[in-house]
Image: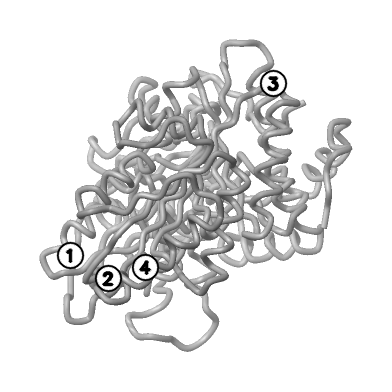
């Protein structure tokens, strides 16, 4: 039984057609014609985000250009109790931007300008539709860059990064989005303009900025972000280690951190992922390896030289069959090229794949990898593993064929069990993709009813009518009750 997939309501449903006809004149009173998409063929591109297994056509799509237009849209929807789903580039992987049939999609795609870049203060003030990589491209002339670098950084937007608290391969040393954002300007569902955080090192009052980052578009709509910029390190060098056993590679991760070395990035790929990435981008990976680790070290010349020698010794001592050290920046980037392209590369192995996202303590990595392999065999579904090994953020990719009856549902169930395994070993159900609709059932496993009530209280404080991205992130008590009663939940472990 699946409690995840929403029921698709036809776009031309009579009730929805009436609601659309009533809302259009009110929007056209202050928005230009090209800012409103109302025909089925116009709204179809917005029916899903990167989790394309779940789709729903929205009532309407609006594309404002100014903060004032965003405010008026939200005030109108607040007054008429119309749900709103804010959307960036649509690269999210948890269904967080899945539309509602009776709600509008508020696209921030036209908020795509870098408003200010201050190299002295090492900050950039940007609109939410600015691409993650575009910030680094603009800052590079000043010897600066923006540290969080999701695999989708060429396309994903900073507003979406704020919504999901995105990370990337360098988050081990430099932190997630929450550690690299100084301030956000937000429009509430009631249309109020609110500033959270500040350009200073600290600000008075509750830390609402940390509360807001990662709230998945449920508390407000981001219209401006101030980010921290980092100086480009004097030197960066990467090591690539091959292993004949996945668990050996998992233990090596803990060995490196235990030795007091904090790499800029520490990533792991298993055999299927290695083979797919190599066939896709020809990065020179050893395709006969059971797993590889990519470890990047950065800092001063002396610091990197010392750490490279230390990490090389640790990798060999942990059972690595081969260790390569990048000879120049081109080779370092080639090491990363396959990892950055791993998700699309795995698409060559199967008609469909389901990308999971959970986080575990590093000490549990060997156990979780072993049990993942056991679950893969139990369900008869292949799993390719690509993940941020250094901080325990796993991305198992479940390979399946949606054209085979029941296979998507079986994939969902396996994904749920992998997430619940993360909770069982002391981890959490997400690291950077968010809960969205995908992991909402597992929220019932990780959190108690009392904790969920507090989440709902926070939501109500920002959005009293529950109109911003409803149905995402936080399950209702009824949903949790239904999930706990499912016959296939005998395996679950609640904390």
The mark tally for this picture is: 4
Residue at mark 3: 380
Question: x, y percentage for residue 200?
Answer: 34, 85
- Which mark, by number, is residue 204? none
Q: Is tag 3's residue or tag 2's residue first in the polypeptide sequence?
A: 2
* Picture layout, residue 338 above or below residue 177: above
Cβ–Cβ under 8 Å for marks 3 and 2: no
Q: Residue furthest left?
A: 141
Viewer-nearest residue: 487 or 393: 393
Cα separation, mark 2 vs mark 1, equals 8 Å
Callout 1 crowding tier (Cα within 10 Å): few <14, some 14–19, many ≥20 = many
Mark 1: which secondary structure? helix
Question: x, y percentage for residue 179?
Answer: 43, 71
Q: Is tag 2's residue or tag 1's residue first in the polypeptide sequence?
A: 1
* Picture layout, residue 105 above or below residue 126: above
Cβ–Cβ under 8 Å for marks 2 and 1: yes
- Which mark, by number, is residue 229? 2
Query: Horizontally, is 396 left or right of 31 in the view?
Result: right
Cβ–Cβ under 8 Å for marks 2 and 4: no
- Which mark, by number, is residue 185? 4
Q: Is tag 2's residue or tag 4's residue first in the polypeptide sequence?
A: 4
Question: x, y percentage for residue 222?
Answer: 39, 59
Between tags 2 and 4, which lies in front?
2
Residue at mark 1: 139
Query: Horizontally, is 234 left or right of 371 in the view?
Result: left
């Amino acid at each position: 039984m699946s409690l995840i997939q929403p029921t698709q309501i036809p776009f031309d449903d009579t009730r929805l057609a009436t609601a659309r006809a009533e809302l259009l004149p009110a929007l056209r009173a202050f928005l230009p014609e090209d800012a409103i998409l109302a025909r089925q063929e116009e709204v179809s591109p917005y029916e899903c985000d990167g989790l394309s297994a779940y789709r729903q056509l929205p009532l309407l799509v609006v594309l404002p250009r100014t903060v004032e237009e965003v405010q008026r849209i939200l005030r109108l929807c607040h007054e008429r109790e119309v749900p709103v789903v804010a959307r960036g580039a649509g690269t999210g992987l948890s269904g967080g931007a899945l539309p509602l049939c009776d709600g509008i999609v508020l696209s921030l795609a036209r908020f795509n300008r870098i408003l200010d870049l201050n190299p002295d203060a090492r900050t950039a003030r940007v609109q939410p539709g600015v691409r993650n990589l575009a910030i680094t491209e603009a800052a590079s002339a000043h010897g600066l860059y923006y540290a969080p670098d999701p695999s989708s950084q060429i396309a994903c937007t900073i507003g979406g990064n704020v919504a999901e608290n995105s990370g990337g391969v360098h988050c081990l040393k430099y932190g997630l989005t929450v550690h690299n954002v100084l301030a956000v300007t937000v429009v509430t569902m009631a249309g109020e303009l609110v500033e959270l955080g500040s350009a200073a090192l600290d600000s008075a009052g509750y830390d609402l900025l940390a509360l807001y980052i990662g709230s998945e578009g449920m508390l407000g709509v981001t219209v401006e972000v101030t980010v921290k910029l980092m100086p480009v390190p004097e030197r960066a060098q990467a090591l690539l280690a091959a292993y004949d056993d996945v668990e050996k590679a998992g233990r090596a991760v803990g060995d490196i951190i235990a030795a007091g070395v904090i790499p800029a990035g520490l990533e792991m790929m298993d055999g299927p992922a290695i083979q797919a990435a190599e066939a896709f981008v020809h990065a020179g990976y050893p395709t006969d390896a059971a797993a590889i680790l990519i470890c990047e070290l950065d800092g001063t010349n002396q610091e990197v030289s010392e750490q490279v020698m230390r990490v090389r010794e640790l990798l060999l001592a942990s059972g690595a069959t081969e260790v390569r050290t990048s000879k120049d920046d081109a080779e370092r980037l080639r090491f990363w090229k396959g990892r950055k392209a791993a998700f699309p590369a795995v698409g060559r192995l199967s008609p469909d794949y389901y990308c999971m996202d959970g986080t575990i303590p590093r000490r549990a990595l060997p156990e979780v990898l072993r049990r993942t392999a056991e679950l893969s065999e139990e369900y008869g579904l292949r799993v390719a593993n690509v993940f941020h090994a250094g901080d325990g953020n796993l991305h198992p990719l479940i390979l399946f064929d949606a054209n085979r009856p029941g296979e998507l549902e079986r994939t969902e169930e396996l994904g749920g069990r992998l997430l619940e395994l993360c909770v069982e070993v002391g981890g959490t159900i997400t690291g950077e993709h968010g809960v969205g609709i995908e992991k909402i059932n597992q929220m019932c496993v990780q959190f108690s009813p009392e904790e969920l009530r507090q989440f709902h209280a926070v939501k109500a404080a920002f959005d009293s009518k529950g109109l911003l991205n409803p149905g995402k992130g936080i399950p209702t008590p009824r949903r949790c009750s239904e999930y706990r009663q499912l016959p296939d939940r005998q395996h679950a472990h609640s904390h």
